[in-house]
Amino acid sequence: MNKRLKEIQARKLEIRTALTDNKDLNLDEIQTELRNLETEEIELRSRADIANKINAGEIDAGEIEKPNQKENRNVDKFESMEYRNLFMNHVVRGEKIPAEYRSTTTADASTIIPTTILNKIIDKLTASGMILPLITRTSYKGGVSIPNSSVKPVAVWVGEGKGSDKQKKTTGSIVFAYHKLRCAVAISFEMDNVSLSAFEATVINNITEAMVIGVEQAIVSGTGEGQPTGILATTPNEDQLISIAKIDYKTLVSIEAALPIEYETGAVYCMTKKTFAEFDGMTDSNGQPIAKVNYGIAGKSERSLLGRPVILCNYLPSYSAANAGQAFAFIFKFDDYILNTNYEIGIKKYEDYETDDQVTKAIMLADGKVVDNGSLVVLKKPDAKPTA
């Protein structure tokens, strides 16, 4: 042990000399080596101290505790700089990650994304997109039934000395499953010498963009089979599925009339930019924009219809591109949609032998569904006329 301790001290002196001589060095590699040397030196000194105490009869050899065991109990190993460098080398250079860092509950993932990267991904998922900030997010355990009430009690006026009927509150339940969202990010062979900060930024941006699109697409039009159940997969209440043969002011008023008054607050339109342009381009008999006589060609269009905000997205067809019977827009109160997410994102790496790219696939577990369809008004193209 003493020999190795001397070697460690000698190597530290070499590194210090190299730094003071202003040589062209890879600082990330130097920091990693110093950290490893420091860890090894602490462990060797702890072992030597334990051995000296055994020789002096101060402790029983059967009661020896592994050095640093207590100190490391509350440390997040996936947040350490050591693991972040191991993770980068695994993805970019194919180096194997030690067994103690490969523990995960997701069978399809061999490696855990470092905690620092994971936190940044969640932050961007929250701030990105037009739909994700509007919905309700939970983290219930998969398979657990969550009660939801279908009837609210009603207060009644009663005479003096009289009571009222006891009302039973009927409840149903919602059960969330776990559906897997997967995205693959290819890192070209030329990125072999990429720095740690640039590598993490690249992974974050690629995974964030893919995850946002995948999640929001499922929220709007997910089938519920192997993915969350989307808003459009939910059956609207009677008289809240409207066929739109022509976009004009009268049609717009009829859409508003279909929305129950109790859902007025918070309900918004959701449609493509092209569809909104058709509503926004409505004109009167004189060719003037509806209710915008002084609008002018330089006027700025506000994204609202009859005072109701419009959320734009690309997860629907436009009115002109929609097929017969296909939904192209809807009104909905987005906080009545719950996205239940397990944010334990893991990754697995493989090589594409056709392009030599190092492909990293990321996995996210989530489910979602509408918990109250009262605010849902779906706009669709008229059904096709039967042929004679």
Image: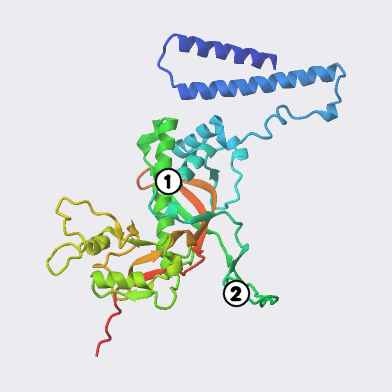
Query: The disc labelled 1 sits on which kind of residue?
Result: Ala
Amino acid type at image mark 2: Val
Which residue has dot 2 on it?
Answer: 156
**How far from the left and from the top, in percent, is residue 56?**
85, 16
- At horizontal 40% and vertical 59% (from top left) the residue drawn is 217
Residue 19 at what x, y percent from top left?
47, 12
Decide: is 360 above or below 92.
below
Q: In which quarter of the image is residue 313?
A: bottom left
Q: Which residue is drawn at 14% across and 70% down?
A: 285
Q: Quadrant of residue 270?
A: bottom left
Q: Residue furthest front?
A: 160
Residue 380 visible: no
Query: 151 above or below 352?
Result: below
Judging depth in this view, the residue of 28 and 193 nearest the camera is: 28
Residue 257 seen in the current view: yes
User: In the rendered view, does 377 fall on the left or right side of 15?
Assistant: left
Residue displayed at 24% across by 54% down:
301
Give the quarter of the figure containing the C terminus.
bottom left
Of circles 2 and 1, which is in front?
A: 2
Looking at the image, residue 251 lies above or below residue 300:
below
Give me the disc on residue 127: 1
Counting other residues with Cα less than 10 Å from the Cα at mark 2, is it few (<14), some (14-19), or many (20 or more)? few
